[in-house]
Image (tube, coloured by chain):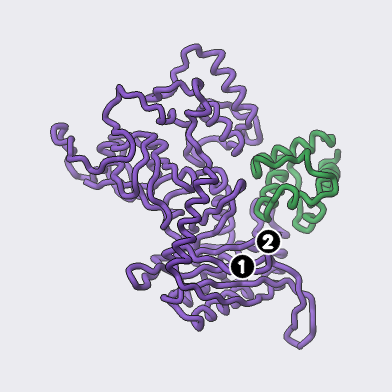
Amino acid sequence: MNHAELERAVAEVLGGIAPEADLAGVKPGEDLREALDLDSMDFLNLVIGLHERLGIDIPEADYPKLFSKDGLLAYLAARTGG
Amino acid sequence: MGLFRMPSLGADMEAGTLVEWLVKPGDTVRRGQVVAVVETQKGAIEVECFEEGAVEELLLAPGQKVPVETPMARIRAPGEAPTPAAAAAPPPLAEPVAAPTEAPTVPKPTAPPPPPSLAAGAGPKVSPAARRRALELGVPLDRIHGTGPDGAITVADVEAAARGAAAEAPTPAPAPAGPASPTAEPARAAPRRGFDPAEMRKAIAAAMSRSKREIPHYYLASTVEMARPLAYLETVNRDRPPPERLLPAVLLLKATALALREVPELNGFWVEGGFRPGPGIHLGWAISLRGGGLVAPAIHDVDKRPLSELMAALRDLVQRARTGGLRSSELADATLTITSLGERGAEAVLPVIYPPQVAMVGFGAIVTRPWVDDEGGLVARPVVQVSLAADHRASDGHLGSRLLAAIDDHLQRPESP
């Protein structure tokens, strides 16, 4: 999966959690949780959605790598081999 | 003959609007079955029936707004003879607020078209955005082919289905009994499945004003060290796939329930000048809604259920609170409410009790702070501020202190709840 495909996947998973969330409007280094007002339940649902959608394991210890948008996309790219 | 009435879903509810019947005359209903969807200030609620038997007659039509306690349907108990047709015209049971139902020739401009299937869990997976779009366009969800993960219905699927329906069916049979074509005035005709922030604000204002007017609150707070519970979660979650992982919230929930077993005087209601114990430990969980507002549906029998099950219940509850689909028992049954501010929240909260409950427990964010350990050394530890607001008519601070100590005690033993 390329960067654009991954970003689309993340946006779709987010759409089911926070329908009004605008991933495109988040700056690369910004904390997604702050920018999109995600609480820990929302964040867990994001991880679950990506786990199911992309078929990858995301250990809890890796969560901090997923807090920023570019960190998240880089992590997913590495995990999906893209 | 039993009457199914508009339920009171909390101290702040005065009236509700019937959105949809999920049963029809002749259907057999059992206790706990969802039989109708009712619009309240807190959004659309799935209303459960507490009668057993057969639906004899529906007394309300979708779109009608009636006060709490107004009969909505007649339920015939098992074994009871059907009411003869001649006797079927009872004295008016109560005059609904809106127009009577008996005149089918009268156009009902406010009556929404039969909404798409609403039963949660019954149909395919649907994203909240897609659900909303389906309602706007008046497309029944069960006629949409989902192309998302696991066949989930996406917004695009809804729009494709709406276009297809318009193109293929010049005279679409717009679902039974729907006077208005769903496509004619989608914006006006679509029932609100979500909630109206202004209405919810009014409901919160009413309940909180009553609380502060009537309840002499007292407040207590303690700091609880969270190193052990968080280490427990880390260990448990390491071996679990994401859908089975636990959040700290579930430990806070369970510990509060177990503490209430030891201090049952704080689990229940203040009614008619006295304390009435709760029939179980059913804990309301305050959920903030996107777009503003708050709802605190109950999780039943928290003290008796394992952590994994409670976590699933909590996730399901948050999802349904935000998309619509809470059940009447969840809104009516809480015996004590918890507010947990979450990881990005403030460090401490002094809660406002939800009447007629007699106490509320609050948890601030889990934060790392200086802590003096058992050897007297200063260390950095994760801690959480646990607070209690309690009704001084029903209890005193001594009892409240015992509850906070018991919560701490149970949090330190997460593996043996």
Q: Nearer the viewer, residue B75 or A53?
A: B75
Residue at image coords 49%, 48%: B42
Relative side of B166 to A8, left or right: left
Colour applied to chain B:
purple
Residue at image coords 62%, 70%: B415
Marks 2 and 1 on same chain = yes
Pinpoint residue B41: horizontal percent, then vertical percent. Answer: 47, 47
Q: Is residue B12 visible?
A: yes
Quarter of the image holding residue B29?
top left
Residue at image coords 86%, 38%: A82
**Is the C-beta separation of discs 2 and 1 under 8 Å?**
yes
Instruction: Quickly name the residue at label 2.
Output: B345
Pinpoint residue B100: horizontal percent, then vertical percent. Answer: 29, 33
Q: Which mark is residue B349?
A: 1
What's under tag 2, amino acid-wise? Gly
Q: Residue furthest bottom?
A: B375
Colour applied to chain A:
green
The residue carrying pointer 1 sits among few (fewer than 14), some (14 to 19) or many (20 or more) residues within 10 Å by Cα, namely many
Q: Nearer the viewer, residue B385 or B154?
A: B385
Q: Nearer the viewer, residue B338 or B249?
A: B338
